[in-house]
Image (cartoon, grey):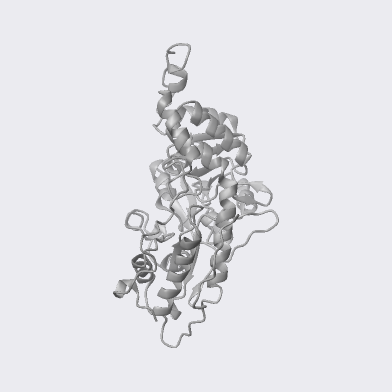
Amino acid sequence: MHTLAIEGGRPVRPDFLVFGRPLIGEDEIDEVVDTLRSGWIGFGPKAIRFEEDFAAYTQAPYALSVNSATAALHLALIAANVGPGDEVITTTLTFCATANVITHVGARPVFVDVDERTQNIDVSQLEHAITPRTKAIIPVHMCGWPCDMDAIGEIAARHGLTVIEDAAHAAETWYRGKKVGSISPFTAFSFYATKNLTTSEGGMLTITREAAHARLKSMRLHGLDKDAWKRYSPGGFLPYETTEPGYKYNMTDLQASLGLHQLARLERNLITRQQIWACYDTAFANLDCVNTPAVHDTADTRHARHLYTLRLRPEALACSRNEFVQALGAENIGTGIHFIPVHLHRWYREHVGTKRGDFPVAEAIGDTTVSLPLSASMDESDVNDVITAVKKVAKRYLAAGTVFTGAEEPQTYKEAA
């Protein structure tokens, strides 16, 4: 058995493989340079073009570029008239921003457990969480797999609730023949550095209602009736006024310069991630101490392949999830944890009154999940290094009496032509 790097052995690879390393091409670099040379680097024509392209891609009537998915969710809650005293139902297995924005508008997050197979909100428990104070539901498309939007939409319609989709992982996702972004009144997307489509920081809110789009277009930039591009573009300065107190949530043309070309390559990059995903599935299929993702594309539903999450089997390993992750890090493999359930975070324990044991499925996932590198920037050696490292660590930490059934040599990943 090879000695783990964390115990003094040689790492699987000499350099660190950054988790979520983006693929940035010359087209993005040239576009950014063009923006810098144009003299207009704030919100302007390129951000507007990016909105138009993204709306077309998601088949949404409207798209509003913002500085983060958090801002997109916040604006959607405002448009849904959610405020103090209201409740918003969401999953606990998500990034804290999903719940934070609920508190930002003065409302109370109400958590629901998840389905173990999909890791998405458990629709069978959704209706039990509804009270007279409930105003909205925020389902999260975990890892890029869509929630059961038909069931969620039906429940929301019956109770007069607004659905705001958190699609931070789901830019490429399709649900039963519908593009995510076109289904609900509001859908928030993230373009953070690790996302399949990145603008370094940034996000988009797709909107189905004209009135909501018009209002949030103003709210995105201080509540002004004219954005900076209109005020300072050719034709001379135009006076403006505040229609209601808004926020500084706009995207810049520098960010959009990345997004325009990231979006153009999104489908091509998805093919690469699908190939890496399939290689991981094959390599880890017979590794008895882990479980691979249990959701698969169908004829009309597509996974965005944002996160590849292994579930460790605690009974088969003589280490914790954190020890497993630290050992992979020593082998120079970057990983992620998606997620520590929000109800276990200190602020929510203290202010919402949640505790361990409230949502056992999400807790079990949160305790045992390891997200592996999955990026279109990865080459053949990167993928094979991940596989080798996972098997090396898994073999070292096998519990007494557990047999290592994974092949000694990794499944070889071959890059697409």
- Give above or below for 173 relative to 373: above
The single residue placed furthest to the bottom in the displayed view is 401
- Give above or below for 379 relative to 331: above
The single residue placed furthest to the right in the displayed view is 299
What x and y, as percent, mark residue 290?
49, 73
What x and y, as percent, mark residue 1?
39, 81
What x and y, as percent, mark residue 10?
34, 72
- Give above or below for 234 relative to 68: above
Residue positioned 42% across, 57% down in the render: 19
* 58 and 182: which is toward the camera: 58
Left or right for 128, reference 151: left
Residue positioned 34% across, 53% down in the render: 351
The quarter of the rendered structure image containing the C terminus is bottom right
On the image, which quarter does residue 127 sit in? bottom right
The answer to whether residue 30 is visible is yes
The single residue placed furthest to the front in the displayed view is 417
* 107 and 345: which is toward the camera: 345
The single residue placed furthest to the top in the displayed view is 236
Q: How many marks?
A: 0
Residue positioned 43% across, 46% down in the render: 192
What x and y, as percent, mark residue 295?
59, 63
- Give above or below for 373 relative to 217: below
The answer to whether residue 361 is visible is no
